[in-house]
Image: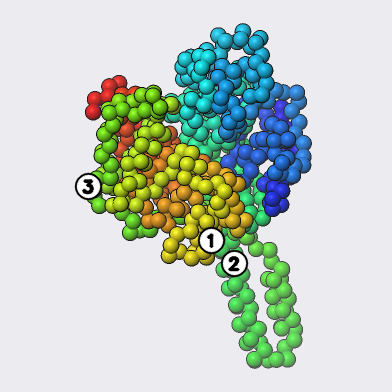
């Protein structure tokens, strides 16, 4: 159905290979997930498959994509900002922000309404004055999914469709991918979705400090792939260790025998020649090498970072929460004390990010806590024109220490001195986490902390945050994060906040009443 033959993708900036001699055939029924660390070329590969011109400005491309005249639908990672000042309805009636409205598409209005209902978007968004900029991040993803469904494509390419989606829509998306008649290739950081949907894995890795690349194609589910990969690595490393120990023992034994022969009877040339021949055979032996894989990130908070039990971290009381003149919720109250780990859940567009910003404005004035903040939009606190390493400069830490720290998070030397705007979303998230560690933050305010981190890094991040002795106030739709890291959960909607149990939060289950 869709064939990729001998694809090479090489970054122009530093000649770093992202994909090398990659070939793959997408078949009917395939639900193929592309996984790998941040900056490994997942999105670039998807763009290349859809339209190579999308990557030619930063990447040297070789190879062919044979589409066999199938129609390909592509959900890009970020909706073009040029759409922001267009009415939502125009997104369905125009091929691009610059194009003219195709009035014939008004005939699809009834179908548009049905598709909006499928993904949980109100038909009110189709009103003339409702601009795309009014939509939340998750609602914009839903909008893109709606257009793909309307276009009736033969193949679907989805780049981070799970970003910012609420749990209810995530569950819908899982069912959609599983039941889709079209084959799907997708990139996602949501491990639960990967486990529930993928039947083929493409794993892109960067090796030798990102000077080389490799890939694995496995016709199996995500969970099975991870378990199989870990067993293979463990067995290979064990075999390599055993062979190396045996080799060293044989070499040592041979040296001892040679020494005895030389000392006892220097003239026994036949015996010595035999020993030298054995030694040559040992030197020519091919040993199993340790698995050549991309190393995991290495990061943790200092063990003495904590906040006293029972200390009031937040005592929030708002008559209402607003965006401009629009009231999002009334009587919003939240009490958090150390060292609680809490998560706020709710549907897309409810105002959770606005609530987080309000909490930030309260907490940033406190001088009795050390606050770490990760907003949903990283540019709220990151200077995109600043070098990555300069953002991490903290008093009492040398540049060599910071460079080592960044190296442990898999930043290359080039990336350390790159402008922040040149980094991937996952690398920016790592920068913010590293800053919190360097600043010894004992309260973390996190808006979707795991959404841009790879599914292979996320278990490590979750473990770090689970064992963190400070307080965490977070918004998340990551079901594994909610289940593993958080001790309390709150549902947020127009009625305010109410505590719910963790299991209901993982399911995205809305409480029937909001009694407090």
Q: Are marks 3 and 2 in contact (CB under 8 Å)?
A: no
Q: Residue at x 45, y 59 (%)?
A: 394
The quarter of the displayed image where residue 42 is located: top right
How many numbered badges does the structure rendering display?
Answer: 3
Please state if 23 lies on the left or on the right of 355 as rendered: right
Looking at the rendered structure, the secondary structure element under dot 3 is loop
**Which structural element holds mark 1?**
helix
Q: Residues within 10 Å of mark 2 (few under 14, many from 20)?
A: some
Return the disc, 2 or 1, that comes first in the chain's sequence.
2
Q: Which residue is mark 2?
A: 244
Asked if one can make out residue 379 in the rendered structure from this viewpoint, the answer is yes
State the residue position of label 3: 310
Q: CA distance from mark 3 to mark 1?
A: 37 Å
Nearer-the-camera pick, 296 or 236? 296
Badge 1: residue crowd in 10 Å (few <14, some 14–19, many ≥20): some
Give the number of the mark in front: 3 or 2.
Answer: 3
Q: Residue at x 77, y 42 (%)?
A: 62
- How far apart, in angstroms, are the residues tagged by discs 2 and 1? 33 Å
State which tag comes first along the sequence, 3 or 2: 2
Q: Is residue 416 above or below residue 34?
A: below
Q: Which residue is mark 1?
A: 403
């Amino acid at each position: 159905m869709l064939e990729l033959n001998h694809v090479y993708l090489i970054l122009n900036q530093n000649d770093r290979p992202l994909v090398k001699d990659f070939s793959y055939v997408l078949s009917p029924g395939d639900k193929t997930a592309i996984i790998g660390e941040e900056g490994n070329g997942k999105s670039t590969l998807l763009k290349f498959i859809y339209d190579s011109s999308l990557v030619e400005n930063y990447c040297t491309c070789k190879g062919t994509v044979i589409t066999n005249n199938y129609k390909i639908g592509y959900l890009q990672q970020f909706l073009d900002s040029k759409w922001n000042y267009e009415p939502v309805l125009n997104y369905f009636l125009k091929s691009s922000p610059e194009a003219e409205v195709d009035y014939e598409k008004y005939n699809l209005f009834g179908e548009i309404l049905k598709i909006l209902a499928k993904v949980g978007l109100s038909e009110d968004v189709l009103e003339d004055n409702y601009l795309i900029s009014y939509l939340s991040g998750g609602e914009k993803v839903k909008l893109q999914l709606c257009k793909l469904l309307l276009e009736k494509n033969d193949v679907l390419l989805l780049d981070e469709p799970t970003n910012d989606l609420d749990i209810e829509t995530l569950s819908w998306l899982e069912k959609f991918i599983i039941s889709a008649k079209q084959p799907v290739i997708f990139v996602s950081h949501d491990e639960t979705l990967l486990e529930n949907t993928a039947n083929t894995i493409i794993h892109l890795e960067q090796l030798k400090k990102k000077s080389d690349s490799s890939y694995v194609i496995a016709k199996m589910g995500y969970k099975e792939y991870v378990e199989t990969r870990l067993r293979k690595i463990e067995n290979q490393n064990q075999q390599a260790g055993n062979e190396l120990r045996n080799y060293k023992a044989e070499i040592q034994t041979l040296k001892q025998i040679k020494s005895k022969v030389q000392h006892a009877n220097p003239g026994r040339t036949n015996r010595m020649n035999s020993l030298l021949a054995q030694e040559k055979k040992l030197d020519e032996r091919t040993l199993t090498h340790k698995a050549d894989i991309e190393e995991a990130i290495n990061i943790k908070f200092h063990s003495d970072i904590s906040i006293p039990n029972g200390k009031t971290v937040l005592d929030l009381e708002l008559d209402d929460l607003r965006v401009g003149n629009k009231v999002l919720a009334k009587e919003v109250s939240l009490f958090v004390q150390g060292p609680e780990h809490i998560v706020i859940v709710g549907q897309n567009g409810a105002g959770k990010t606005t609530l987080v910003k309000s909490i930030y404005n309260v907490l940033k004035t406190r001088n009795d806590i050390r606050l770490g903040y990760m907003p949903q939009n990283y540019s709220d606190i990151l200077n995109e024109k600043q070098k990555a390493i300069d953002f991490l400069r903290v008093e009492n830490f040398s540049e060599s220490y910071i460079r080592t720290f960044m190296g442990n998070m898999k930043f290359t030397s080039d990336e350390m001195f790159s402008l922040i705007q040149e980094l991937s979303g996952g690398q920016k998230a790592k920068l913010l986490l590293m800053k919190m560690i360097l600043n010894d933050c004992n309260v973390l305010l996190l808006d979707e902390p795991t959404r841009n981190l790879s599914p292979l890094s996320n278990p490590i991040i979750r473990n770090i945050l689970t064992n963190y002795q400070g307080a965490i106030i977070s918004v998340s739709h990551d079901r594994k994060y909610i289940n593993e890291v958080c001790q309390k959960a709150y549902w947020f909607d127009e009625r305010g906040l109410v505590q719910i149990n963790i299991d209901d939060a993982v399911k995205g289950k809305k409480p029937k009443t909001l009694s407090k």
